[in-house]
Image: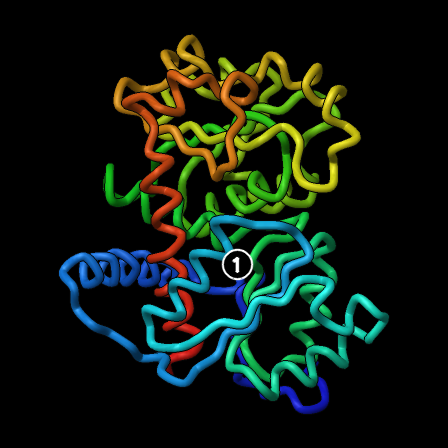
Amino acid sequence: MVKEGQSMTVRHFLRLTDVSSEQLAELIRRAIELKTMQREGTLYQPLVNRVLAMIFEKSSTRTRVSFETAMLQLGGGAIFLSSDDTQLGRGELLEDTARVLSRMVECIVIRTFEHAKLERFAEYSQVPVINGLSDTYHPCQLLADMQTYYEHRGPIRGKTVAWVGDGNNMCHSYINASLQFDFQLNIACPKGYEPTSDFLTEASGHVQLFEDPSEAVRDADLVATDTWTSMGQEEETEERSQAFGAYQVNGALMSLAKSDALFMHCLPAHRGKEVTADILDGPHSVVWDQSENRLHSQKALLEFLMAR
């Protein structure tokens, strides 16, 4: 349904499934090309005089810096707005903020808790809205992950990915990615921390759920994990540490994956908790490339959404 003032041609990026598999493949290809251009010193500024607004209800390092840097390198600018910097914090309707802000800028990134806020904001926005992270999805991180795998090992299609840990927003986006990039996803979670059942049903042909992390990781091409306690769950830290103790990615677990398997973590990481230092800093790990690629994949995304 198109709301008042909204163009029917507005394209949003709230989840990986908002774009086609072909478009995602093109975004990865373009991200690698833009990365090469930057390293060669090629000046490329298709977004001159374009402005990105960034509304963050959750703190961030990589998301904020990568989007602001991306806009600067592409010739545009970015405005950062925390909860205290907008009238949303004083009770203005989300719909009204969307109506006003989207008349002043060319794209909006929102990093929030409830995914429904993103959906509602996008309904009333005249410009593209990007999910910078919600409690349900983290699609921008998956763009960087898929780019990183491609750079190190080629296409991920037909490979086996093991997700170890919480069935959280990253896990949900990996489930989306298994459909869009056509790989097998093995998910190892303790009971009570599984991903939402609707996601599992939708991707039933690509996803298998395990309680034993050893079974999930066996012969995997990629092993990925995340912190055991996400933002907003701090009161559950002790309970979660006990529940996830057997789901640490360590040398013994990685030895069950293929000998050339990659390890990824979206960061920040807690050495000695969800991953040991020897894995995070060792030869399997590509987390630093993965983190850097947030910049390049998001440049490709901003170009795709804005430069036309």
Q: Nearer the viewer, residue 160 or 48?
A: 48
Q: Nearer the viewer, residue 35 or 183?
A: 35
Q: Nearer the viewer, residue 38 or 171?
A: 38
In this picture, residue 63 sits left or right of residue 59: left
In this picture, residue 188 sits left or right of residue 27: right
Residue extending farthest to the left is 40
Q: Residue at x 64, y 19 (%)?
A: 244
* 188 in relation to 69, above or below: above
* 169 in relation to 130, above or below: above
Q: Quadrant of the N terminus?
A: bottom right
In this picture, residue 143 sits left or right of residue 16: left
What's the residue type where badge 1 is placed? Thr
Q: Residue 233, percent across and down?
A: 74, 36
Residue extending farthest to the front is 84
Mark 1 element type: helix
Q: Residue 77, percent across and down?
A: 44, 75
Q: Residue at x 32, y 56 (%)?
A: 28
Q: Residue at x 55, y 28 (%)?
A: 187
Residue under label 1: 17
Q: Residue 55, percent across and down?
A: 63, 65
Q: Residues within 10 Å of mark 1 (few under 14, many from 20)?
A: some
